Structure formats: C-alpha cells, structure tokens
Image: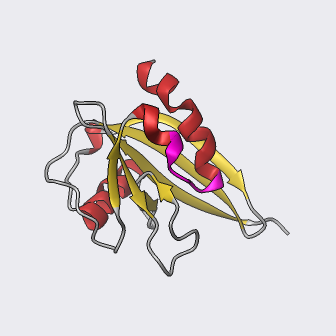
Amino acid sequence: MTPRLLFVVAAVLQKHSGEILLAQRPPGRSMAGLWEFPGGKLEVGETPTQALCRELAEELSVLIEPMHCRPLTFVEYPSPEFCLFMPLYHVTQWQGEPRGHEGQALSWTSLSNLHRYPVPPADEALLRDLPRLLTA
C-alpha cells in the first residue's frame, strides 16, 4: 500500500540582522518539543505560496506577500504513515511581529546556532544545508 502524500510548506523567516525564526511544536502534538520552520498544510485549491501566507498569518500574525516568498529547497521524507513533501521558502519581508498563536514557543537564532535545536527528522537535512542555501 502506498502511503498518503502529506504536502506542507515552511518558511525561513530571516531578519535583516540574519537571525532566523524557529517554532517549537506545542504539547499534545506529534513531535512536541521539537523545533521547526513555521508553516503548515496546503488546503484544497491553494498554491504553496498562498498556503504559506495563510499559515503564517494564522500561526504568527505576520502578513507576507507571495512575491516575497523565494523558493529555497524542498524535502521529501517517507514514513510508514505518509510521505512528506515540503518546499521551503526564504522570507525577509513581512508585516507584524511574530507571535505564537497555537501555543508554540518562538526563538530567533543565528545560522551558527541552528544545530542546537532538536528538529523533526525531515528537517535535519534542511538545517545542515541552510547556510549554503542562504548564501547562494
């Protein structure tokens, strides 16, 4: 049996100072306590950038325009329950100050400190490759 496809989008929100935003998965969710790039699932009829803009508004109260979402990379991660496909976007322009509206803690961190945050297995390669991707 083929596992279902789980299509999610995520963003590297980066301040002009270089710090990157991570969100901690709240208690009661799968992989609670792990850190991730903010984002979420696509809804029917949405493009990835539309979904990203909606998710960041709902989760963090930040407004971004699709034209400010620069594709960075993607990850495909198989698990027994599903196959995750997640494009990752780089966002440096938004309106509002990020606030966790779903019980998640937020942390701004430097590229050099990203390795200190435990992340879901699907995100490990993203953290490893991020310094190279952001300077390309």
Q: How many marks?
A: 0
Q: Residue furthest right?
A: 1
In the image, residue 131 lies at what x, y percent? 48, 27
Nearest the eye: 83 or 122: 122
Residue depicted at 30% across the width and 31% down the height: 18
Residue extending furthest left? 96
What is the image's colouring? Answer: secondary structure
Q: Residue furthest bottom?
A: 28
Report the quarter where the C terminus lies: top left
Q: Residue at x 56, y 58 (%)?
A: 7
Taking the magenta stretch, the answer to whether it contains residue 120 is yes
Give the residue displayed 44% in from the left and 61% down from the top. 40
**Quarter of the figure with residue 51:** bottom left
Which of the two residues, 38 or 71, is positioned nearer the viewer here? 38
97 displayed left or right of 3: left
> In the picture provided, is 48 more to the left or to the right than 13?
right
Instruction: Give the side of residue 83 with respect to residue 7, left or right.
Output: right
Q: Quadrant of the N terminus?
A: bottom right
Q: In the image, which residues are magenta? A: 115-121
Q: Could you say where residue 13 lies in the image, as x and y percent from the top left?
A: 32, 43
Q: x and y percent of residue 17 in the render?
A: 23, 30
Name the spot of residue 9 as percent of width and height, x first: 46, 53
Residue 84 location, quadrant: bottom right
Q: Nearer the viewer, residue 17 or 64?
A: 17
Indicate whether 81 appears above or below 60.
Answer: below
Instruction: Report whether 77 appears left or right of 98.
Output: right
Quadrant of the rendered image containing residue 99? bottom left
